[in-house]
Amino acid sequence: METLKEKTTRGLFWGGMNNVVQQGLGLLFGIILGRLLNPEDYGMIAMILVFQLIATALQESGFKSAIGNLKEPQHNDYNSVFWFNIIVGVTCYVILFFVAPLIAAYYHTPELVLLCRVAFLTIIFAALGTAQSAYLFRNMMVKEQAKCNMTATLLSSMIGVTLAFLKCGYWALAIQSMTYIGLNSLLLWYFSPWRPTLHLDFGPVRQMFKFSSKLLATTILERINTNVMNILLGRHFTKHEVGNYNQAYQWNSKVFYLLQGTLAQVAQPVFTNVADEQERQLRILRKLMRFTAFLAFPMLFGFGLVAQEFIVLTIGEKWLESARLLQLLCISGAFIPISSVLTNMLISKGKSGTYFWVTFALCATLIATMQVLYPYGIRTMVVAYVIIYVLWTLVWHFFVGRLTGYSLWALLLDIVPFAMIAFGVMAATWWATQSITILVLLLAARIVMAGVLYYVVMRVLRVKILEECMTFMKERIKKK
């Protein structure tokens, strides 16, 4: 039997592999799509994305995390969740089918009616795989989840690029998303040994609903938070401007999700497994925080450093304004994985109510701020968005600290040194390379110099997290 440390390490490895491949494919196909499509195409999809995400959250209903918190979930628990999700998924699609004209009217874009009715079919496709996903999640079958995600990403991206090449415009993005969700659900069925039965018993759903309903509401608010800019920009600005922001956000999310997605697959199950050992749980939390900060700050600050060269070289000068917004978003992107570790701790403690209200406060703050600032332009809105997300890390810590004894001083010791070193490395790299005028050489020089310099500083300071990562990689190589 594997120890918890071995399961966690294996989960981080496969979760990392999954996210590296996914984001790598996203990088490759994102470049191709960015060259084939224009900002207006991305703007069309950005306008309806939040509705699709909210409906998917309703379909999931927070039961995946609720099952993750059960010590020994039974067949009836999964079966109850499966049929409940099917019912909710179909219901959501029917409602949104008839609401599509209202969505189009809000954005003053009649073409959105048909786009909504086709794109929202992903809600039903996702409903078919939720219980299977919950089974793999609860049993920390990260390798199997990785295979599902990587295969679905590759095939759906190929279809999206083919449609874009055939001049299908925003439909290429819509069909790509539908294909990804459908294939992923199909593969979840293949890898999960659990199968539903026709015996309907919603008793387990009712028992989990008090916890899961708060997670559901929180998830909806999170989807609004991450898309609040798209919602308001689509109302007050052109499709071109919405597309520029959406492109910047998508590239930013590819980088931070590379780490956040890895941690999300192991954090909550690990915290739950040591729920009765508070000191050990706190040690694990702090170690995950240091690991996250060790990677998040150089990754995101580094991407911000090369954002302009990267965007111009890969998807063209038509996205130059998107690159400037991306530089700002990378600052908040570095803090999102850190906040994610803290929220996973809250969920593992069963504090879904706290999770909801803190997320609600964030949502209200974002909406109120953006409503006040939109007359001053998109850049001003993005600056405010970044500041709020950075400061909200301290809000999440306040509530986690009360539950675990994780002091503010300990938090600062765990993350600030990595932030300062990463910032110093990027500043030194920028200064040393600013005279290079050839974009390809500038991009290469900055990536190599920043990577080497950060590694050297970590080695000189003998940072324990680096040593543990190196030891783990050596062990993996020996086993192979």
Image: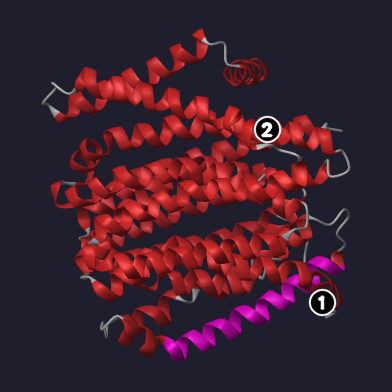
Residue at x 54%, y 75% (from the top left corner)? 55
Apparent side of residue 428 relative to residue 138 in the rendered image (left or right): left
Q: How many numbered marks are there?
A: 2
Depth check: give the residue in front, 133 or 366.
Answer: 366
Residue at 34% in and 36% down: 303
Q: In this view, does 176 lie above or below 464?
A: below
Q: Mark 2 points at which residue?
A: 286
Residue at (68, 19) in percent of width and height: 479
Q: Is residue 472 visible?
A: yes
Is residue 264 visible in the rendered image? The answer is no
Tell me if residue 407 comes above or below residue 479 in the rendering.
Answer: below
Q: Is residue 218 left or right of residue 455?
A: right
Q: Which of 18 and 287 is in front in this view?
A: 287
**What is the span of residues highlighted in magenta in the rendered image?**
76-99
Lower position in the chain sequence, tag 1 or tag 2: 1
Q: Distance between the residues labelled 1 and 2?
A: 35 Å
- Residue 84 in magenta? yes
Q: Is the magenta region chiefly helix, strand or loop?
A: helix
Q: Position of residue 249 (x, y in %)?
A: 36, 53
Of tags 1 and 2, the one toward the viewer is 2
Q: Check the picture and name the quadrant holding the N terminus.
A: top right
Residue 14 picture location, percent across and down: 62, 37
- Of residues 357 and 150, the one drawn nearer to the viewer in this rendering: 357
Instruction: Residue at the far top: name it.
Output: 460
Task: Give the residue pinned by disc 1.
Answer: 206
